[in-house]
Amino acid sequence: MSNLLLPARTAVLNDLYQKDTATVEEIMADLKCHYGSERQFTKKLFSDHCMALEANGMVELTGYELDDGGELQMKYTITEDGKNTVHKYIAKKYQDE
Amino acid sequence: MNSSKLLDTQALAESKMQSLNKSFHITGIGNGLVSGLTYGIYSTLVVVASGYNPLASAAGILAAPFVCSGLNDFFAGIWLLFYNAKQGRLKELMRTLRTRPGMMLVIGFLLGGPIANGAYLVGLSLAGAYAIPISATCSLWGALFSWIFLKQRPTKRVVFGMLMCVVGAVIINLVKPEGAPNFTLGVICALLAAIFWGAEGVFSSFGGAMIDTDVAVNLRELISGLVSLFIVLPFIGGGMHLLSGTFAAMTPIYWLIASGLSAGISFVCWYKANSTVGTAVGMSLNITYAFWGVLFSVIFLSQALTPTIVVGSVVIVLGAILVTMNPLDFLRKGE
């Protein structure tokens, strides 16, 4: 990824664009190398990003289950609106990485 | 895993999901209501601040409102910097500014910040609390601009709500209050504020959904404050002199630091409400600021309560709610 990082919420959408479907934990694992050292890198904030993207129609909740620790794992899938937004507003160099 | 244990786990997951959805919805509604209340407080505190010298005796109609709106937004931006620093999001500010949606938002901020906030405070200083419900017609303009520029046709319900906003504004203007220095000009300024706030919303349609709203609001307040104070104010006769005089007096500064805190909380909650319960419900709850603003002005600022402001405010708020949502949906969701 470029030295100039995307804003975190944009990076979450971009990650879902590349993977199509992922849980919050999987998204965080993908982004850990870039954002992992920042204090904002918490499950609460990244869940908020996913839920806000969902409320705006960019992604949809396609499943949920409990993990071994009894924590709720939510799985999100990017929507057509989300894909169009990535095409239109995220620079190509980020989309391909 | 045996089948009964699997069913138990599924049931537990479902109940956890339901309670998460419920708390998400309740938090969203709570945020919307708090945003309306704190916007009413902000509107009142700014009027209190402008009652102190040198703001109270400032010459012209523009200098004092722009000093107030610039300082209020700047202080709100500083409060929000503390908030975002605590969350570890300061780097997000520059990252957001470098994206195209971020740049489009900034154009919207310039319309909604220095221009609309400035006009709103000029309106408040000239027409008193009457400016507050007039400015609540912003949802009418937002729907109108979406129709013109984004080709989003309004439904019959939205058009009816728009007409109610207009009728409410006309009712408020039927009787000119005593003591307002230039009532009609004040109402026109409040209307200009509503138009530019409506236009601001249109600029968030260009990818704004993938921007963190807490960061966007921080940028909005900082940009609005800095542009008002250092780009607009120097062109207003006596503006910079009034700014330094206000700092020397200090008392109005304390009030503006408090109003900036209210405005910051209001915007953060409003955007949070929009991204949890949807813009329609969020905006409808935020619009309750017209009630709070008028109520606080009557209680704390000796604003006369006339039948026209009461009826007009109610009609505008109901109209604005109709523009943004179907009240029946709200009741159904509540179930």
Image: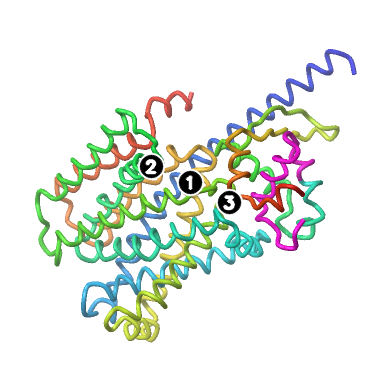
Give coordinates of residue B121: x percent, y percent: 30, 64
Residue B79, compared with residue B20, is above or below; it is: below
Q: Quadrant of the N terminus of chain A?
A: bottom right
Looking at the image, tell me whether mark 1 or mark 2 is earlier in sequence order.
Answer: 2
Above or below for B50 versus B26: below
Q: Residue furthest front?
A: A92
- Figure quadrant of residue B156: top left
**Marks 2/3 same chain:** yes
Identify the residue at image location x=31%, y=81%: B239
Decide: marks 1, 2 in contact (CB < 8 A)? Answer: yes
C-alpha distance separating marks 1 and 3: 11 Å
- Reading the image, the residue beneath label 1 is B205
What's drawn in magenta, residue-wise?
A: A1-27
Point out the tag, 1 or 3, that comes first from the N-terminus. 1
Query: Residue B243's spot in the image, x, y percent?
Result: 36, 81
- The image quadrant that residue B216 belongs to is bottom right
- Neighbor class of circle 3 (other Cα within 10 Å; few <14, some 14-19, many 20+) is many
Label 3: state its secondary structure: loop
Q: Could you tell whether B316 is left or right of B36 in the image?
A: left
Mark 2: which amino acid? Ser
Q: Give the secondary structure at mark 1.
A: loop
Whole-percent x and y of residue B141? 31, 46
Q: On the image, numbered disc 3 is attached to which residue?
A: B211
Is residue A7 located in the magenta-colored stretch of the structure?
yes
What separation in Å lies between label 2 and label 3 (alpha carbons)?
20 Å
Of the pair B238 and B68, the residue shown nearer to us: B238
Question: Residue A16 lies in magenta, yes or no?
Answer: yes
Chain at tag 2: B
Q: Read off the residue under disc 2.
A: B146
Cβ atoms at labels 1 and 3 below 8 Å apart = no
